[in-house]
Image (cartoon, rainbow, N blue to C red):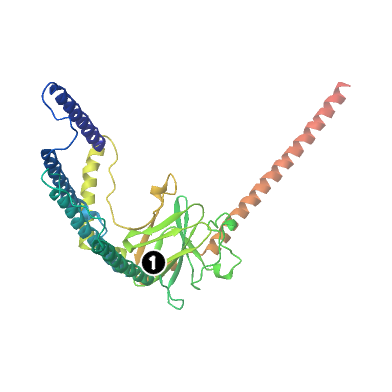
Amino acid sequence: MTSLLVIIVLVLLAVALWQLTKIFDLTQVGSSSDDSQVASDNDNNIQGYIMFGFLAFIYIFTIYGLLKWGGLALHTPASEHGLLVDNLMNITWVLIFVVQFITQGLLYWFSFKNRGNKDKKALFFADSNKLEAIWSIIPSVVLACLILYGLYAWNNIMFVDKDEDVIEIELYAQQFKWTARYAGNDNTLGKANVRLIEGVNTLGVDMSDKNSEDDIVVSELHIPKGKKVHFKMRSQDVLHSAYMPHFRAQMNCVPGMVTEFAFVPTYTTAEYRELPFMVEKVAHINKLRAEKSAELVAKGGTALDPYTFDYLLLCNKICGASHYNMQMKVVVDTPEDYKKWLSEKTTLAQDIKAAAAAEKPAAVEGAKTTTDSTVKDTVKAVIDTVKAAVAKVAMK
């Protein structure tokens, strides 16, 4: 609301200034003026200094933005390949800022230097092979180096050796939630198809596949520190995007196909919470929440819960009305805690059997109730018939 009011005020000020200029023009009626529509040396000087002012505004706002919002960027990566991604990003940012600083400075400087002057004559020339070579070769070389480094980073991140010891996990996306499926002891995910979705089997796992017998389906993702995790991703309905920002991992989930991504976690959830920058960030967030809670309580509302950091799996595609709420908690455990957590989970096959066993007594009870009701109705009908016959005989 505050931002909207500021925008409205700025628009009204602009309109007011525009009206003042019109009033000023009306006050000049009858006075001598230059109506030639040709800029004078004074006009060109004013435009030149205005351009320098705009250049200063660009630089000042850029520096202000870095100081004001620079701390909102992601900090320490929580995966092995995260440093490679951050290095690539930092190199790109440095190149962008350096090139922007040089090109914008030269653009406005030459515009000011060569502003209109009645004593100057413009120099025109058709072309310059030297200039063409400079502004073609330099960007080409820089971009080629950046792209080659990007390909190197991409190949290092995406390569998974077939013989490598990894943990196989499926991430299943649907509007508007995530579900994870672990491969179990055989470390091989069973086949799945959306046509097989039924009851407890919400992922459409093919239970006739022997690899599906030990698959485990959960709604909270746990992964071990220091172990490569190979994610295979599916979507049930629309295009989603599995985004784990702290692990510098993102991959689209496309209906009808399986995509994949792998990384090695380097910090457990507990360790990441203890990093100095995260302690400071959480303290700052909770301070803001405490101030907001005081306002809410004063108005008769409910106070906000304190914030605790957790890794998250988010959807990074606008997949529908509740897209903002499509997330799943990710917990990085020590290898020992991870094994303990996984051992306590039941397999999908066990869940299906338990659901079937729970449905059977209900079906039997329903059938018994139906039978009892039928018997009662039959007895009641016989009694009513006998009563009618007795009454008829009595009347005769």
Label 1 neighbourhood size at 10 Å, few (<14), some (14-19), many (20+)? many
User: Which residue, as the protein is rendered here, is positioned at the far bottom?
Assistant: 163
**Residue 349 percent coordinates (x, y):** 55, 64
Is 189 displayed left or right of 73 in the figure?
A: right
Q: Nearer the viewer, residue 14 or 30?
A: 30
- Residue 77 shows in this picture: no
Is 121 above or below relative to 228? above
Query: Quadrant of the image for the N terminus?
Result: top left
Q: Nearer the viewer, residue 154 or 316?
A: 154
Is 318 above or below relative to 163? above
Residue at 82% of width from left, 28% of height from top?
388
**Residue 99 percent coordinates (x, y):** 22, 59
Q: Which residue is mark 1?
A: 223
For label 1, the SS is strand
Query: Quadrant of the image for the C terminus?
Result: top right
**Residue 113 percent coordinates (x, y):** 13, 50
Marks counted in the figure total 1
Q: Give the amino acid at mark 1.
A: Ile
In the picture, residue 77 is in which quadrant?
bottom left
Residue at 19% of width from left, 31% of height from top?
13
Q: Nearer the viewer, residue 167 or 233?
A: 233
Is 268 above or below relative to 124? below
Q: Nearer the viewer, residue 250 or 337?
A: 250
Residue at 23% of width from left, 55% of height from top?
125
**Residue 353 percent coordinates (x, y):** 58, 61
- Residue 17 shows in this picture: yes
Is 104 displayed left or right of 147 in the figure?
A: left
